[in-house]
Image (spheres, rainbow, N blue to C red):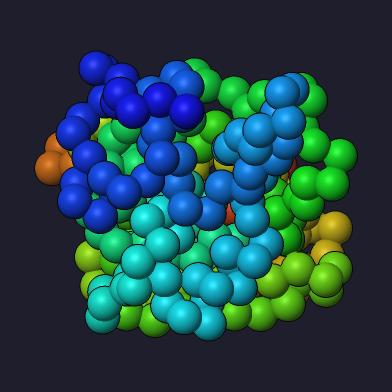
Amino acid sequence: MSMNLRPDLEQLPPRLRKLPIDARGYPVPWFVAWVPGPDGVDVPEFRAMDAQKFRDAVKQRLCWVCGEPLGRWLAFPIGAMCVITRTISEPPSHRECAEWSIRNCPFLNNPRAVRDHADVPADARAPAGFGIERNPGVACLWMTREYELFRDGRGGALITIGKPEGVTWWREGRAATRAEVDEAIASGLPILLAAARRDGRFAVEALETQVIAARAFLPIDRHESPPSVDAVREDVASPVVPLREKASSSS
């Protein structure tokens, strides 16, 4: 392990300064699983979470990133599709821990980054629920005061995030534009729609309702008019969901 943070990363907020730093100079989030390395010394496996940490985070209200007790506010860094479904597989964090992660995590702040599945430990558990294997392109920080746990029907646990008290959108460590958020939704929604169609008409109708509700939380573009309900319904009903037409121009 290293003691030196990478020079291209922001300084760590106080709660994250107790985290170990890996050999590359990245802080190791509290939830990360540790596995035996080539020399027998445990090393962090960033692609796997520690199942016991999940249980502790839920039962003891601990931050998913730093492991310290949470306060009243709960921060969920999520992708655009999770804004639609309001479902996620990871417990909440402190706002400052989540924001630092969004701005500095090499997967969250780089839309071109892809998940590396090479040499994943054989006993690593896949996340609960139906995961979408892609980089969402943008990240949403969803602030709420509550969430609910439910079973995914396959032995795992998922989270329904509560009513938002604040929503911000990010891309590459800065505020995301409306065009960038629209692009992320347009590229991911067909995946949700295909899954809903496999489950039948009622699932498609439920997705339509979720998409309409999610539109209220998108960043405002002062150059465009808000979409009509009929326009959103047409998007969801389409076999391939296109980018929504703009009232004037762009994302």
In front here: 191 or 212? 191
Q: x and y percent of residue 208 in the render?
A: 58, 64
- The answer to whether residue 218 is above or below residue 157 is above
In front here: 195 or 99? 99
- Specify the quadrant that holds the C terminus: top left
Q: Residue at x 85, y 68 (%)?
A: 154
Q: Quadrant of residue 66?
A: bottom left
- The answer to whether residue 167 is above or below residue 150 is above
Relative side of 50 to 220, left or right: right
Q: x and y percent of residue 22 in the render?
A: 46, 29
Relative side of 81 to 194, left or right: left
Q: Residue at x 29, y 62 (%)?
A: 94
Q: x and y percent of residue 113 in the render?
A: 52, 21
Q: x and y percent of residue 74 in the render?
A: 33, 70
Residue 219 visible to the viewer: no
Q: Quadrant of residue 64?
A: bottom left
Q: Residue at x 66, y 33 (%)?
A: 41
Q: Residue at x 53, y 54 (%)?
A: 31
Residue 114 visible to the viewer: yes
